[in-house]
Image (cartoon, helix red, strand yellow):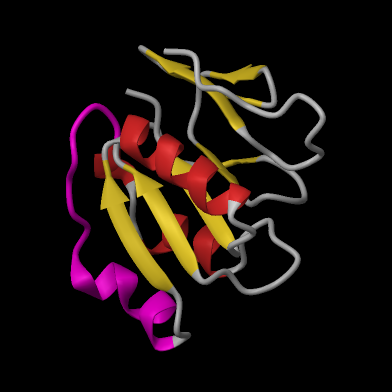
Amino acid sequence: MKLHSDPASALNTVTAYGDGYVEVNRVRFEHAVVFGPEGDIVAWPVASFEDVDTSAMEYLERPAAPSQPEVVLIGTGARQRFLSPSLLRPLLKAGVGVEMMDTLAASRTYNILMAEGRRVVAALIPA
């Protein structure tokens, strides 16, 4: 599915999503990624939702963003799933909101929050 973007924008934008991939800034990624509006798009070392563990969550505690995010959106693949509260505790203790949703919904939500100028980080697992 193609998502609309502002081609003049210098901010990281999800431009498409489909089976087995996420596209950011018109670059296709067939692995999980973590990114904020500015900065690098980095590989997230998980192949599926089941791989999200303490080590993977540490990537979100120091995301590719210039400042601490207000919220981290976790795209859990083809369907919405929920992580154990113990995995979320470090982010929540730091005052960072965490939302889990299917990856398509997380992609759309990221684009909206990014366009509003919010400090958001997306961690997306392709379906």
Would you place residue 104 above or below residue 66 in this image? above
- Residue 67's image quarter? bottom right
How many badges with numbers are in the image? 0
**Residue 110 shown left or right of residue 65 in the figure:** left
Would you place residue 52 above or below residue 58 in this image? above
**Residue 12 shown left or right of residue 17 in the figure:** right
Q: Residue at (46%, 66%) from the top-left corner?
A: 71
**Residue 102 shown left or right of residue 23 in the figure:** left
Q: Which of 111 and 30 is in front in this view?
A: 111
Region of the chain picked out in magenta, as a range = 77-93
Q: Residue at (21%, 72%) from the top-left corner?
A: 85
Q: Where is residue 36 in the image (x, y as percent from the top left)?
A: 63, 52
Would you place residue 68 above or below residue 23 in this image? below
Specify whether residue 111 is in view.
yes
Please tell me whether residue 85 belongs to the stretch shown in magenta.
yes
Q: Residue at (32%, 37%) from the top-left corner?
A: 105
Which quadrant is home to the C terminus?
Answer: top left
**Residue 67 shown left or right of residue 45 in the figure:** right
Q: Position of residue 83 (x, y in %)?
A: 22, 58
- Residue 79's image quarter? top left
Which quadrant is home to the N terminus?
Answer: top left
Would you place residue 116 above or below residue 27 in this image? below
Q: Residue at (39%, 72%) from the top-left corner?
A: 97
Q: Where is residue 72 in the image (x, y as percent from the top left)?
A: 45, 60
Specify whether residue 44 is in view.
no
Q: Nearer the viewer, residue 115 or 31?
A: 115
